[in-house]
Image: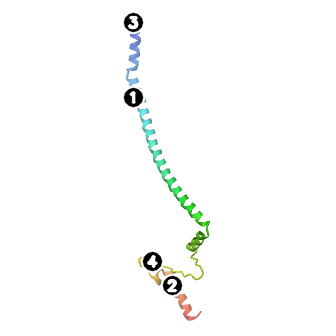
């Protein structure tokens, strides 16, 4: 019986130590390794996306808190008055309003009357009509 066991063992070794089985094992390990590398890549991408979404969540929460405070301020008379003054340039009776002109247009070389060709042409004709009394 020992000889038969030896022969069966030789068949087993001959099958598993053959080039075909070694090549199949290497191919199987390569497939498993590529799968692990692919999963690692997906994990990194998902972690980056989670970090981006967390940052957006914080940004949205701060904007929501700011808007909530603004809404609470609009529940009071002073808040409504301040918003109306800011958006519509309203003033109370007896108050005077001061308007500051932005110097942006002057820095770019556009000054007053000659700021745009269409506007200057329209102003010239309007001034001419006013001067002639039409």
Label 2 vs 3, first from the N-terminus: 3
> Horizontal placement of 108 versus 67: left or right?
left
What residue did someone put label 4 on? 105
Label 1 vs 3, first from the N-terminus: 3
Q: Are marks 1 and 3 in contact (CB under 8 Å)?
A: no
Q: Which mark is residue 2?
A: 3
- Nearer the observer: mark 2 or 4; the answer is 4
Label 1 vs 2, first from the N-terminus: 1
Q: CA distance from mark 1 to mark 3?
A: 33 Å
| Other residues around mark 1 within 10 Å, as few (<14) / some (14–19) / many (≥20) | few
- Nearer the observer: mark 3 or 4; the answer is 4
What residue did someone put label 1 on? 26
Q: How far from the left and from the top, in percent, is residue 110?
A: 44, 79
Q: Quadrant of the C terminus?
A: bottom right
Which secondary structure, mark 3?
helix
Label 4 vs 1, first from the N-terminus: 1
Q: Nearer the viewer, residue 32 or 13?
A: 32
Which secondary structure, mark 2?
helix
Q: Which mark is residue 121?
A: 2
Residue 66 versus residue 83 in the image, above or below:
above
Q: Residue at x 55, y 88 (%)?
A: 126
């Amino acid at each position: 019986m020992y000889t038969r066991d030896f022969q069966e063992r030789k068949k087993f070794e001959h099958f598993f130590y053959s080039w075909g089985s070694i090549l199949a094992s290497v191919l199987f390990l390569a497939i498993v390794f590529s799968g692990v590398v692919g999963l690692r890549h997906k994990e990194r991408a998902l972690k980056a996306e989670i970090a981006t979404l967390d940052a957006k969540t914080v940004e949205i929460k701060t904007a929501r808190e700011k808007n909530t405070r603004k809404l609470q301020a609009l529940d009071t008379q002073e808040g409504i008055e301040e918003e109306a003054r800011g958006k519509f340039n309203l003033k109370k009776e007896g108050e005077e309003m001061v308007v500051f002109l932005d110097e942006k247009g002057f820095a770019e070389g556009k000054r007053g009357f000659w700021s745009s060709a269409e506007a200057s042409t329209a102003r010239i004709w309007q001034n001419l009509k006013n001067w002639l009394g039409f």
